[in-house]
Amino acid sequence: MLSDDQLLRYSRQLVLSELDFIGQRKLLDSRVLVVGAGGLGCPLVLYLASSGVGHITIVDHDVVELHNLPRQILFDERDVGKKKALVAADKLNQQYPDTAVDAVCLRLTEVSELPEGTFDLMIDATDTPSVGLVLNAYSIVHRVPLLYLAAVAMEGRLFFARGYEIDKPCLQCYFGSTADPAGGCHTLGVLAPAVGALALLGATQALRSLLGEMPETLLCLDAWRLNALQLYVAKSEGCTACGI
């Protein structure tokens, strides 16, 4: 059941056949782990919360810096020097009463450091392969889908890892078959709206997965030239993480 306030708040998306009342209730009951509250994570958690995802845990060790502000839209100059996860959680909790947002301030290096709890979806918005592989290990053991996002310059990639299924690739399968651009935002730069575009696509596909429809392909986005390519990633035989 939805309350009167919820019926009004989500009225425009309740009419969508992909969502409806049952789907909205499912979103309100969902739990999502988001690692990274940067250029990808900020718009992503904002739209997950505004869409009515009931519980979000944000993991990030970093503090807000001035050069973050063009891309990291949850922050302003008053937040410089503060912990990103804490600021993001505080702002989302104030703005979206149906969403409980927790903050965990740490640099994720081991599976044992992940917050306790059961998640319906994990999202890697760090653009850091080592973090992605930690989440990948957890995903395989606990059978939780993992959404991986990466952006640099004017391009981005979006991939769902489900290595716990016998015929689906994990994140390590993807890393072994497709090379991301060498370097990161520090050396190659990044365009703020391009990162935002990928994050919004990620939020849309995250909602889709929470509603039970799992994307099957790798999306490669060139936001500047308005090109998008979908590729099939096969499960790698002998993969050390999820190998057949």
Image (tube, rainbow, N blue to C red):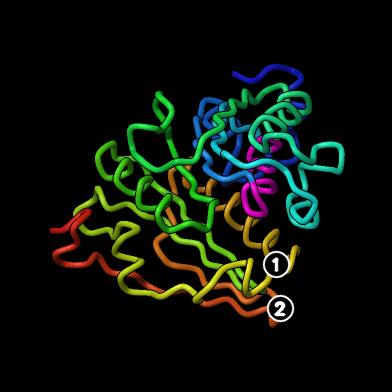
Q: Is residue 43 magenta?
A: yes
| Spot occupied by residue 177 in the image (x, y as percentages of width and height) | 32, 74
In the displayed structure, does residue 15 sit left or right of residue 172?
A: right
Please give the range of residues in magenta.
38-50
Mark 1 or 2, nearer chain start: 1
Q: Residue visible at 58% across and 76% down?
A: 228
Q: Nearer the viewer, residue 93 or 204?
A: 93
Q: Secondary structure at mark 2?
A: loop
Query: Marks 1 and 2, Cα distance to the nearest angstrom?
Result: 7 Å
Kind of residue at disc 1: Ala
In the displayed structure, does residue 55 sit left or right of residue 8?
A: left
Q: Secondary structure at mark 1?
A: helix
Q: Which mark is residue 135?
A: none
Q: Which residue is mark 1?
A: 194
| Spot occupied by residue 7 in the image (x, y as percentages of width and height) | 72, 26
Q: Residue visible at 22% across and 54% down?
A: 241
Which of the 4 image quarters holds residue 174?
A: bottom left
Q: Is residue 172 magenta?
A: no
**Residue lying at the far front of the rendered structure:** 81
| Spot occupied by residue 116 in the image (x, y as percentages of width and height) | 40, 24
Q: Residue visible at 75% across and 40% down?
A: 12
**Picture quarter with the N terminus:** top right
Which of the 4 image quarters holds residue 3?
A: top right
**Picture quarter with the C terminus:** bottom left
Kind of residue at disc 2: Trp
Crowding around mark 2 (Cα neighbors within 10 Å: few <14, some 14 to 19, many 20+) is few
Q: Which residue is mark 2?
A: 224
Question: Magenta stretch: dominant SS?
Answer: helix
